[in-house]
Image (cartoon, rainbow, N blue to C red):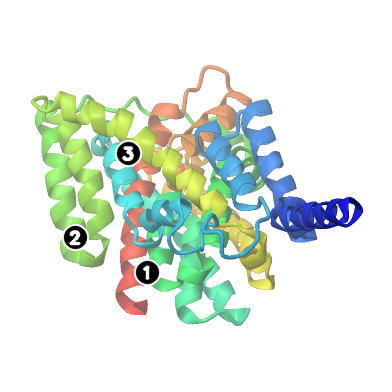
Amino acid sequence: MMFLEAQGFFSFLGENIRQFFGYTGFANVTWGHLVMICVGLFFIYLAIRHKFEPMLLVPIGFGILVGNIPFYPGMEVGIYEEGSVLNYLYFGVVKGVYPPLIFLGIGALTDFSALISNPKLMTVGAMAQVGIFGAYMIALALGYTAAEAGAIGIIGGADGPTAIFLTSKLAPDLLGAIAISAYSYMALVPVLQPPVMRLLTTKKERLIRMKPPRPVSQNEKIMFPIIGLLLTCFLVPTGLPLLGMLFLGNLLKESGVTRRLATTAGGPLIDIVTILIGLTVGASTQATTFLTVKSIGIFVIGAFSFIIATFGGVMYVKIMNLFLKEGNKINPLIGNAGVSAVPAAARVSQDVGIKYDRSNYLLMHAMGPNVAGVIGSAVAAGVLLGFLS
């Protein structure tokens, strides 16, 4: 009798252990989970070891780890399972809530003086958006739908929040792949852009010295976000959520009477939203939904979009110089800064430039097209949203 009871107990215990093991990650792991975990570790490595946009890649990399912990379906822990905490946090990405808040913080941190003092640099930022439309056409040629191609194209703007905002409206099923691609290439700007810049410029062009920017008055700084909002949003009303918040943040900074609000928008608020957007975007790379042929195609097109954007910005400056008098010419090395990766792209202009002339500081000039790129990518997103939605 005691033997039968002991046998029943061990049988019951064994069944409980088997059941428990069935719920563990070890029982539910796939090769896809392991691949994505390696990707997450690689992102964290790049951020910590090589300082590649650590504010972005650390939360995204850790989010990839979180999103690829294998679990038994129906436990309400995955980011795509309704009722889970991660699913609630992901709501801000899916519905496009986080990107405008990021833009509010960017506006509060951005000084548009370089652009105001030399307005023609706005056109450099506009021309660099050719990467968006180049990637759009490539995606169409590869068989993506028009809406999907528009969402993929925005990667060329080097603007993660804009990519998330537009993709949430046009192609929500590609959100994870496009967001990860956009942020990955933003972090890799120092790797992707210099070879293109050197290939397209001559030594003489790299040594061009630009005139110091003129001083900008406080009144000009105050008027810029107001005029900028009216001009851009009358032209592209669909860009209002991003552009409205960008210019509001800048007005809070420049007005001089809302310093506390500007400090909050450019400090604690943008930091909190960056953590949430990085974690949830990373977690959205759950292997069961992320590892597809489309996702791989998006990464390839994204790389080409950055190359096209850099090509467009640099070549546009070279063409402009044909019509500018000696002494007013623009160093084409700042053409790369027309993408929206602020201030990473401007730092690339500076780093490449000082290799050829250590006393030629291009950073202050490169910030003009760089901040113009922020506006340009939001306008381009508005254009795509207007005719594709």
**Label 2 neighbour load within 10 Å: few <14, some 14-19, many 20+:** some
Using the numbered discs, state the Cα–Cα distance from disc 1 to disc 3 in whole angstroms.
22 Å
Query: In the structure shown, which secondary structural element does the residue marked by tag 3 occupy?
Result: helix
In the rendered image, the quadrant that contains the C terminus is bottom left
> In the picture, residue 8 is in which quadrant?
bottom right
**Circle on res. 353:** none
> In the picture, residue 165 is in which quadrant?
bottom left
Q: Amino acid at mark 3?
A: Ile
Query: In the structure shown, which secondary structural element does the residue marked by tag 1 occupy?
Result: helix
Residue at (41%, 51%) from the top-left corner?
A: 89
Residue at (47%, 80%) from the top-left corner?
A: 146
Between 332 and 259, the one nearer to me in the picture: 259
Query: In the structure shown, which secondary structural element does the residue marked by tag 2 occupy?
Result: helix
The residue that label 2 is drawn on is 233
Using the numbered discs, state the Cα–Cα distance from disc 3 to disc 2 in whole angstroms.
18 Å
The residue that label 3 is drawn on is 106
First of labels 3, 2 by sequence position: 3
Residue at (57%, 28%) from the top-left corner?
A: 351
In the rendered image, the quadrant that contains the N terminus is bottom right
Circle 1/circle 2 CB separation < 8 Å: no
Position of residue 281 measured from the top left corner of the image (x, y, whole percent): 51, 52
Instruction: Say whether residue 87 is visible.
Output: yes
Q: Is residue 291 above or below residue 314?
A: below
The residue that label 1 is drawn on is 169
Q: Is residue 182 rendered to the left or right of residue 364?
A: right
Residue at (70%, 40%) from the top-left corner?
A: 41
- Between circles 3 and 2, the one closer to the viewer is 3
Between 326 and 167, the one nearer to me in the picture: 167
**Label 3 neighbour load within 10 Å: few <14, some 14-19, many 20+:** many
Q: Is residue 48 rendered to the left or right of residue 110?
A: right
